[in-house]
Amino acid sequence: MFNRLITRLFLLDQTPKEHYSALKRNIIAVMLLITIVPLATMLVINYFQYRSHLRSQIIAPLYAMAEKTRHSFELFLNQRLATIRFISTTYSYQDLNDEQKIKKILISLKKEWQGFVDIGLIDSEGKLVSYAGPYSLVGKNYSDQLSFKETQIKGKYISDVFLGHRKFPHIIIAVQHLTDSGQSWIIRATIDTDFFNGLISSMGLPRLTDSFLINQEGILQTDSLYYGNTLEKWPLKLPRATSRPGSAEQSDNQNRNVIIVSSEFSITDYVLVIVQPQSVALKSWHVLQTEMIVIFLISLTIILVAILKMADVMVKRIKTSDENREAALAELQHAQKLSSIGRLAAGVAHEINNPLAIINEKAGLMGDLIELSANFDKKEKFSDLAKGIINSVSRCKKITHRLLGFSKRIQVHIEPININSVISEVLDFLEKDILYRKIDIVVDFSENLSLIQSDHGQLQQILINLLTNAFAAVDDFGRVDIHSKNIEDDGVRILIEDNGCGMPADVIKNIFDPFFSTKKEKGTGLGLSITYGIIKKLGGKISVDSQLKKGSVFIIDLPAKPNNQE
Amino acid sequence: MKNKKTRILLVDDEIEFITTLAERLELRGYTVKITQDGESGISTLASTPFDIAIIDLMMPGLNGIDTLRQIKEICPDLPVILLTGHGSTKDGMEGMRIGAFDFLMKPLDINELMLKIKLALGEAPKG
């Protein structure tokens, strides 16, 4: 299954050009898949983990602040409640019903405790019997009011904020007192809520953060920065609250996404609410989020560039390797073809050589007989005819010997060789080229050139390669000089110099490398490489000197005998 | 013309070739005996004295090189010229290594053959 997938992805059955572009595309796709999927997965996991962790870290201080402030509120209210309860137990009904005494009590309360506005005594019927404060409330009946009923039932009462006669927000705290004789009365005190606002101000809220009290119906008990003044309806929904503070995320009436933290009072129906815009609360999360995305995008870009580059290099290498393999295969096929042709030519040449020898002798004998005969009509003509046959045989002999000689290239035979003869043979072989292109061949052979032990066929091959290259380098009517001379240790030097196009330094550097060719499609790039290999094998060396537009000279030094023959 | 005719033994399986070559050599004053294989060439040499032998390298049965070896055993001083139709000097060189005077490639140039014969018999100056 996996193998089949790999085969389908990378061993494509298309034309070569499409093959490489499809291969490149598939390599890129697979590499992207195996690098980006884990990276993206890691990013998503990290995103949610960090978000969850950071949110809890961000909301925790808000919880703490809500709890602390609620506690301060409750402490304030409990202190007021305890004070009223203390008065109810310390003073008798008669004491409290004394106008002077109750006024003194109010003065003391105002002096010791912040927020008290008035204080009154209500009898068991709900009638205010005694009062100290700014209003004239004595005789007012509270029996049908919630504060009276609630106090009668629970023994204490803390009201929601309301606007009194002075239109200032305040609350009522009431405590019931029961005497041993079963008589009951209620002390009712009014407290203004300036302290509430002071407590909220002292919370040290961050920028754009709002905090306020609401009751269970959502009516603001203190002023809010963004959601109205005291006794207005708060427009949002309270988060579900349990014993612990609750939190929720909502969009407010100003279309801000906000985090709401609430903490319910235990002694009254108040709820302390803190509202913070997410832009403030999650600022550090947003910074981290941006950093994560930027890092991901940078990684993605680097991966993408690396993958594209790698795929390009890989496919180019595969392509070069394929081309080299094909070139080597073509060269091998070419060599095999040449070998087959060589063997065939050798067979044909050998078979023709024997009849040629007979024709030669017969014509020779004919000539001999004509020469020895007395003069007869057209004797000279017959003599010429016989010579013509011999000359033709001589031409055929050259061809058959050349064919036989070249067919021997495939086998290595070390034998004494006169390099001048080999050069002459090769020039004979290339005669047609030289004639057609009118190339000026200048030969400068050393007359006393040493015989060397070498392989005739392989020397022919290297000379053919070098001379063919020289002919390719020159224009028609160009000039190729061939020199031979003795060098030290009985070796021989051959120089093949042309006045052709020459080569730049970067070409010279690679000229003997396999598959390096300046002939584009026309060459396999193996000719000079093979030449170099053969010369090395024969114990010689080859070097080249070239000047662009002036020509090149190849210098071949051959030893007296190959290394392994010593 | 020489007083005593030079005797040449021609050994080659190609009868058309050697009969014609023999005739040409005879026209040039030599006495020529032909045989068509190595064995008969050796037996002819064992029974009859010759001044020079011309032997083809490629023959059925005993080839030219082996024939030369055996001839050198019975007539070490007899000059032998080898003929090769291979177009390669390799066998010729091998023949010279084991005692042949020289070798020539087919088809022959009669003048070259004459020169080699004279050189072998010491009748022409070397070089």
Image: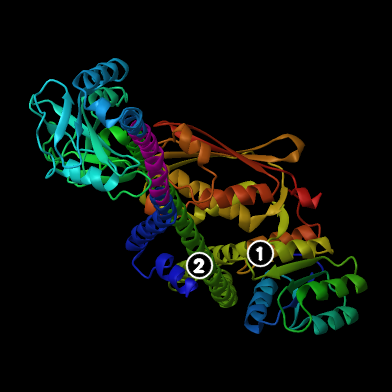
Q: What's the residue type where badge 2 is placed?
A: Gln
Q: Residue furthest front?
A: A181
Which residue is more in the foreground, A145 or A392?
A145
- Give left or right: position of A292 versus B16: left
Which residue lies at the image location 87% right of the left edge and 79% below the top edge?
A: B48
Pointer 1 and pointer 2: residues touching (CB < 8 Å)?
no
**Label 1: element kind:** loop
Label 1 and label 2: CA atoms lie apart by: 17 Å
Label 1, on which residue?
A411
Give the number of the disc on residue A333.
2
Which residue lies at the image location 70% right of the left edge and 35% below the top edge?
A: A487
Within the magenta stretch, is there residue B34?
no
- Give left or right: position of A500 versus A193: right
Q: Is residue A387 above or below residue A548?
A: below
Q: What's the residue type where badge 1 is placed?
A: Gln
Q: Residue B9, can we see it? A: no
Counting residues from the start of the chain, the first of labels 1 and 2 encountered is: 2
Q: Residue A293, can we see it? A: yes
Which residue lies at the image location 79% right of the left edge and 52% below the top edge?
A: A565
**Label 2: element kind:** helix
Which percent across, then down, holds residue A52? 39, 46
Q: Is residue A259 above or below residue B19?
A: above
Indicate the quadrant where residue A343 lies.
bottom right
Question: What range is drawn magenta here?
Answer: A45-70
Tag 1, which chain?
A: A
Within the magenta stretch, is there residue A47?
yes
